[in-house]
């Protein structure tokens, strides 16, 4: 069963991503662009982000409506604080009247996971080199290509002053250590922008005059959401930064391109709303 699921996943995600990546790699090599493999990774990352754009727009629409509903949600929390069941019913009623499903905001994260994992698996094939600098999985890569003319003979892993097949921990050179710092920084920026766009991350109880009651104890649900928000804002970037330190630089190129493009999309989306 697991083998068949692996085959299906490979057919739906890994092989299409691999073919597109090889296409751009060969295109950049043909026109003589240095660092063709690195630019191919950036190109396919942007392509995936564009593919996910409708889900991103859905997420932003939900976040904007939730921001408008927040005063009403705060009032409901105050009114039905001792009746969780009634509170949930009234919240669902308010969401229905507004024409949104709060859970749809998670759709963007869910949909992108197979694509991200597929790209990760694809890059794992490309980023394995022997001591002579030759790609180990070159035949396996060519076997997955849709068209014979896409076949690659050699993959140059160098991108500017970096070898994309090496991790900073393997390279041991100072400029490689800048990559994990940059990766963690961009992840933190992305998390901060995303949380700012989501008004439900600020869920402190309110008084009747609309000011936050700092003395009032938060509910268990509030504390849980705050803890999750803190974890996403601080722990996740640190974790990705560590992965960037231990995994090939090529994967960091993907993470950084995806984060930067996500940040740009958020700012463009918000500027269009003004």
Image (cartoon, rainbow, N blue to C red):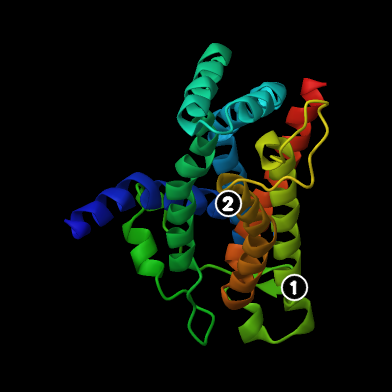
Pick whichever of labels 1 and 2 is earlier in the sequence: 1
Say which quarter of the image contains residue 180.
bottom right
Q: Residue at x 52, y 85 (%)?
A: 132
Q: Which residue was labeled with disc 1?
A: 161
| Residue 49 coordinates in the image, percent (x, y) | 59, 41
Residue at which label 2 appears: 224
Q: Residue at x 70, y 73 (%)?
A: 162
Q: Is 214 situated above or below 74?
A: below
| Residue 234 placement, left or right of 131 | right
Q: Secondary structure at mark 2?
A: helix
Mark 1 neighbour class, 10 Å CA radius: few under 14, some 14 to 19, many 20 or more: few
Q: Position of residue 202 (x, y in %)?
A: 72, 41
Image-based side of 109 in relation to 207, left or right: left
Disc 1 is placed on an element classified as loop
Foreground residue among 240 and 202: 202
For the image shown, how many numbered marks are present on the structure? 2
What residue lies at 62% left-to-right and 51% top-to-bottom? 223
Q: Nearer the viewer, residue 250 or 81?
A: 81
- State the quadrant of the N terminus: bottom left
Residue 156 appears at what percent x and percent y? 58, 69
């Amino acid at each position: 069963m697991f083998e068949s699921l692996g085959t299906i996943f490979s057919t739906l995600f890994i092989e299409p991503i691999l073919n597109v990546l090889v296409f751009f790699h060969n295109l950049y090599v043909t026109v003589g662009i240095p660092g063709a493999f690195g630019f191919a990774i950036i190109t396919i990352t942007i392509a995936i982000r564009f593919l996910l754009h409708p889900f991103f727009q859905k997420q932003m629409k939900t976040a904007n409506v939730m921001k408008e509903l927040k005063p009403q949600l705060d009032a409901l929390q105050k009114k039905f604080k001792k009746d969780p069941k009634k509170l949930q019913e009234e919240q669902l009623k308010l969401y229905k009247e507004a024409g949104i499903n709060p859970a749809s905001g998670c759709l963007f994260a869910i949909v992108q996971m197979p694509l991200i994992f597929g790209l990760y698996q694809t890059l794992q094939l490309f980023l394995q080199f022997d001591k002579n600098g030759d790609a180990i999985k070159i035949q396996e890569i060519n076997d997955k290509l849709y068209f014979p003319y896409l076949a690659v003979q050699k993959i140059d892993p160098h991108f500017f002053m970096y070898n994309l097949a090496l991790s900073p921990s393997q390279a041991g050179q100072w400029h490689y250590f800048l990559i994990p710092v940059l990766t963690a920084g961009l992840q933190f920026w992305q998390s901060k922008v995303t949380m700012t766009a989501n008004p439900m991350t600020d869920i402190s109880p309110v008084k009747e005059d609309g000011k936050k009651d700092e003395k009032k104890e938060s509910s268990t649900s509030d504390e849980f959401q705050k803890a999750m928000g803190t974890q996403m804002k601080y722990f996740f970037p640190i974790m990705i930064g560590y992965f960037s330190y231990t995994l090939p630089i090529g994967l960091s190129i993907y993470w950084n391109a995806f984060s930067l493009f996500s940040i740009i999309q958020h700012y463009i989306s918000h500027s269009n709303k003004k």
